[in-house]
Image (cartoon, rainbow, N blue to C red):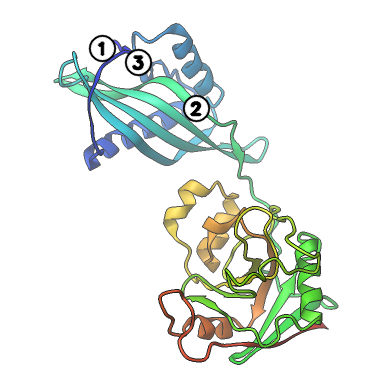
Amino acid sequence: MAFDHSDHVTYQFFPRHWDEDDIRLRCQELAEVLTAGENVSGFIAEGIPENDRDGLRNYFSRLSGRDVSIVFLKFHVLSRVGDTDEYNDLRGVLELRFRVEDEEKEKVTEHTVILQSSRCGDSSGMKWKFCRILWNDNGVDVSPVVIHQLDAPSPGEEICVVTTDAGEIRMRLFPEKAPLAVVNWKVLAAEGFYDGMPFSRVIRGFVIQGGALDGSGDEDISSFGGYFRDEVEKGLYCFNGAVALGNTGPHTNGNQFFIVECPEADEGVFPKASLPVNVEETYREAGGLPELDGRYTVFGQVFQGMDVVERIASQPVDGDDYPLGDPVKIRGIEFEIF
């Protein structure tokens, strides 16, 4: 069945589980063909313009012979078109993400492509085929990275001790990866800025947050005289116990901070996050909030006192996540050599 880009859409609707099952099976077949280094022409619709055919063929041929696996797929648009028979009347806009492993180079990449697709066939069987690449990235490197964040402090390392009404929280700091955030934290702590401040936002299974309340007008107070830039380098992640700066958008770091209190990461985030493979494994083991990575500056990690963090997170709260009764407050912040 030839595909015509001018097909008239007569109806748009939500995909059902059988549509998703069909396209998932089809994409798994594509991954197997690519891994085996075989020809992908059977996945390309007939009757499409030659430049669309070449674009599809060239895109997939780059991946041929490597280990390809499907990570995520979703129909964003599914529609019926007129002037066709009932076996060839579906069109879809499909987001497809797949992982490619290159053993020779010891490299892993994730690729996302948005494809225009068509259901083709007759009463003997139907198969989805691809008609045009609407958008694609060049691949995101998700090769394993070095992770030191969850290591115990080294002898001679400076650590931070936050004393609260609920007990002590001891944390490592990472001045090499987040120098501005660490300097800001140490200067404000030395000035006593946080002394007596409550953890004013408490969400169990998410975070506990301190610093100036949103809307107070003091959110931009910092050791730099105002907001300062983000430091979201690879190597620091929002694992359970991570200490990060709160913000209201890019480069709006001041004095707000939060500690992640999330023992189990949301599995639904992983297919969409393009995390290094060992970072994803660590999230599964340690918990955390991968959906916050790349948006918030992580500058520390709790290594002792997560039971205190959990007690703070367990406080009853109102509709704005502010603790009911007397909130847990910070009594003081000190620094010592481990």
Front residue (pair 30, 202)? 202
Q: Which residue is mark 2?
A: 135
Mark 3 residue crowding within 10 angstroms, few (<14) / some (14–19) / many (20+): many
The kind of secondary structure element at disc 2 is strand
Mark 1 residue crowding within 10 angstroms, few (<14) / some (14–19) / many (20+): some
Which kind of residue does numbered mark 1 sit on?
A: Met
Mark 2 residue crowding within 10 angstroms, few (<14) / some (14–19) / many (20+): few
Question: Dividing the image into 4 quarters, which one contains the C terminus?
Answer: bottom right
Q: Which residue is mark 1?
A: 1
Look at the numbered discs 3 and 1 and tell me whether their residues touch, using CB distance below 8 Å.
yes
Q: Where is residue 328 drawn, in percent x and y?
A: 57, 88
**Which quarter of the picture shows residue 307?**
bottom right
Name which residue lies at 50% across and 80% down.
313
Front residue (pair 99, 306)? 306
Q: Which residue is mark 3?
A: 45
Alpha carbon of mark 3 to alpha carbon of mark 2: how far?
A: 18 Å
Q: Is residue 338 visible?
A: no
The kind of secondary structure element at disc 3 is loop
Mark closer to the chain start, 1 or 2 = 1
Alpha carbon of mark 3 to alpha carbon of mark 1: how far?
A: 8 Å
Q: Is residue 308 visible?
A: yes
Name which residue lies at 43% across and 84% down.
316
Question: Dividing the image into 4 quarters, which one contains the N terminus?
Answer: top left
